[in-house]
């Protein structure tokens, strides 16, 4: 049996507030030069895959990728789709934006889809 230390035995050493803030800011996407991503999917590959899909909701890579980004943004409240929003609508917004903006194909596809979804499913001003 593996024995784990009790929570009382674990002590976290937190540096001075300025050091903690500097660490947080340096790892923030807004302050990083270029975010590190593991995905090898490019926007041009996604655009090609979307162009080749036979149906808007065909069970394919294009639809899955677009909906995954949409769901992540909705869950994290980066976008606020109405209760009547549909998969078809989200996929159409993503596909149309990618096709209309080949100048962004050198950017990561999740970033490009964020640019599409934020205005299309904007959150009300709070």
Image (cartoon, rainbow, N blue to C red):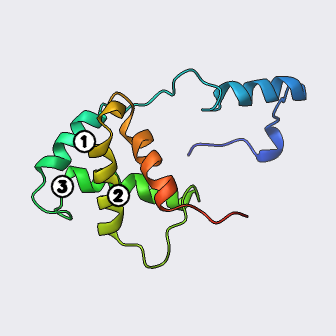
Q: Residue placed at 39% from the left, 34% from the top?
A: 108
Q: Give the vertical position of 70 relative to 107 (above or below).
A: below
On the question of residue 2 being in view, the answer is yes
Q: Between residues 20 and 42, which one lies in front from this camera angle? A: 42
Q: Give the vertical position of 116 relative to 74 (above or below).
A: above
Residue marked by disc 3:
60
What kind of element bears circle 1? helix
Dots 1, 3 in contact, CB < 8 A: no
- For the residues labelled 1 and 2, the Cα–Cα distance comes to 14 Å
Dots 1, 2 in contact, CB < 8 A: no
Q: Between residues 89 and 71, which one lies in front from this camera angle? A: 89
Instruction: Decide if residue 125 is on the left or right side of residue 41.
Output: right
Other residues around mark 2 within 10 Å, as few (<14) / some (14–19) / many (≥20): some
Q: Between residues 18 and 120, which one lies in front from this camera angle? A: 120
Residue 60 spot, x, y in % from top left: 18, 55
Residue marked by disc 2:
93
Q: Earlier in the sequence, mark 3 or mark 2?
A: 3
Q: Quadrant of residue 15?
A: top right
């Amino acid at each position: 049996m593996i024995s784990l230390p009790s929570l009382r035995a674990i002590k976290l050493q937190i540096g001075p507030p300025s050091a903690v803030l500097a660490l947080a800011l340096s790892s923030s996407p807004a302050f990083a030069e270029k975010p590190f991503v593991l995905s090898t999917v490019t926007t041009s590959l996604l655009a090609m895959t979307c162009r080749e899909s036979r149906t808007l909701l065909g069970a394919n890579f294009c639809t899955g990728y677009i909906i995954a980004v949409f769901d992540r943004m909705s869950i994290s409240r980066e976008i606020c789709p109405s209760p009547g929003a549909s998969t078809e609508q989200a996929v159409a917004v993503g596909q149309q934006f990618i096709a209309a903006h080949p100048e962004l194909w050198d950017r990561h596809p999740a970033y490009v889809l964020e640019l599409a979804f934020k205005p299309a499913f904007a959150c009300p001003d709070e």
